[in-house]
Image: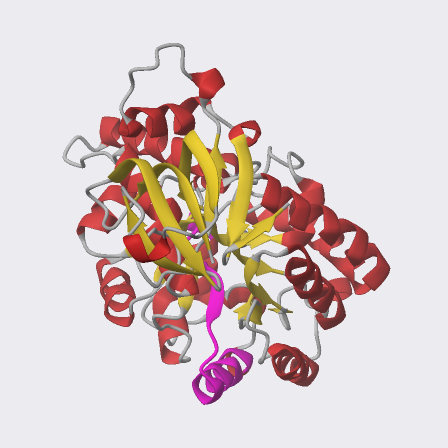
Amino acid sequence: MYIIKGDLIFSKDRDSLNCIKDGYIGVENGYIEFVDNQIPSEYKNISILDYSNKLIIPGFCDLHTHAPQFENIGLGMDKQLLPWLNNHTFPTEARYSDVDYAYKRYEYVVEKLIQSGTTRACIFGTIHKQSCQVLINLMQQKGIRGYVGKVNMDINSPEYLIEDSNASIQDTLDFYNSNKDNEDVKPIITPRFAPSCKEDTLAKLGEIVKEFNIPVQTHMDENLNEIKWVEELFPNYTTYADVYEKNNLLSNRTVMAHCIYLKDSELEVLNQRGVYIAHCPHSNANLASGIMPAKPYLEKGLKIGFGSDVSGGNEIGILKSMVLSLQLSKIRHHFYPDESTLSVNEAFYMATKSGGEFFGKVGTFENNYEFDALVIDDNDLTINNDLSLEQRLSRFVFAGDDRNIIKRYCFGKEVG
Ligand SMILES: [Zn+2]
């Protein structure tokens, strides 16, 4: 067991922030034993990691990113979703049939995630199960936790990146079976998006989800042309969400990326099923997809975390997603004055506790939660030293970056 000391900031709910100046967290076997402004008497002899005057916040949770696209960051940013996929994303992903190629790239990906303060991530690989295995192994070795998905694509995809339908299902099962007992990095069912899967394949994936109780990640309602395409491809379904719903792919273990243009009935079904939305502000801005109404969604009870969505998104770190989500929410308010705007506390909640919930008891400093944390040295951000902890957090969010993160912990262990 150890005790960590510092200026603690964490969310318990979306409205308020919990701040403890010179607070202590007791950590045993990865779990939080106590959080207090003094050390309880029974723990007086335990060793202390002293980060006095540093901020300690929960690690960031990235609900949506694509490991093979890290090498494309900043490229193709003059295109919208569908041409961008065809010109940039798919040719790159095809290279991951080569496991050695994947190893070099994925080593970089995991290092970058750690550097940016992400301790939990929900990640798309490619259609290639061996390369996805490399990614799982690297995350485990380097000490961050989360989910990796072998992508399913068996229709409407380029011939160099398309699977035989039976092989797609079999590889998904193989990948699941090889990793089902892994407690650190787990497999997740990953149809790329409805257009890239045959209806029968979606149905079979839904059966696998039901049988083995596996989580799901995919995309929805990102771009208006994409939505129109889904309507054409799936005329027997009422909405985009209905395609996933009828095929058993929506539950409280599903992450749905984007959801910018939810119809009322879609919002209702996501709420009913308890689906997590990955809000990906950088990607949405870069690909001119639109601005997700984050605040109205929160007010309607939807569960939202952030996704970096590299490389639609150009920022790996969730810190920058927080900032852009706040800025975009204000721009939306300009066009829709009836909508209120996100607060810094809400963005912090989404980046930590709300997104963290998808991974279990993760994302906050409460008893029995898994201890994920970042130690922040904000000395160089503070000319005046009489700021409250809440103000110091806000300054770090808007003016800080990776360089202020001096230690990272995932499930009680230091990483990086
Ligand atoms: Zn994506």
Instruction: From the viewer's side, name the closer residue of 239 and 214.
Output: 214
Q: Quadrant of the C terminus?
A: top right
Q: Give how far across and how far down residue 163 sits, in percent.
A: 70, 74
Q: Give how far across and how far down residue 130 sits, in percent.
A: 75, 70
Q: Give how far across and how far down residue 285 sits, in percent.
A: 46, 35
**Vertical relation: 84 (above or below) 357:** above
Q: Is residue 100 left or right of residue 324?
A: right
Residue plotted at (37% across, 63% down): 361
Residue plotted at (41% across, 39% down): 56
Residue 324: quadrant of the picture? top left
Residue plotted at (26% across, 68% down): 269
Q: Is residue 83 left or right of residue 319?
A: right
Residue 381: quadrant of the picture? top left
Q: Is residue 337 left or right of residue 67?
A: left
Q: Is residue 321 left or right of residue 349?
A: right
Q: Residue furthest bottom?
A: 211
**Vertical relation: 5 (above or below) 85:** above
**Vertical relation: 329 (above or below) 311:** above
**Vertical relation: 61 (above or below) 392:** below
Residue 290: quadrant of the picture? top left
Tell me if residue 220 can be seen: no
Q: Give how far across and how far down residue 196 sits, in percent.
A: 58, 66
Q: Which residues are magenta?
A: 201-225
Q: Does the magenta segment cover residue 93?
A: no
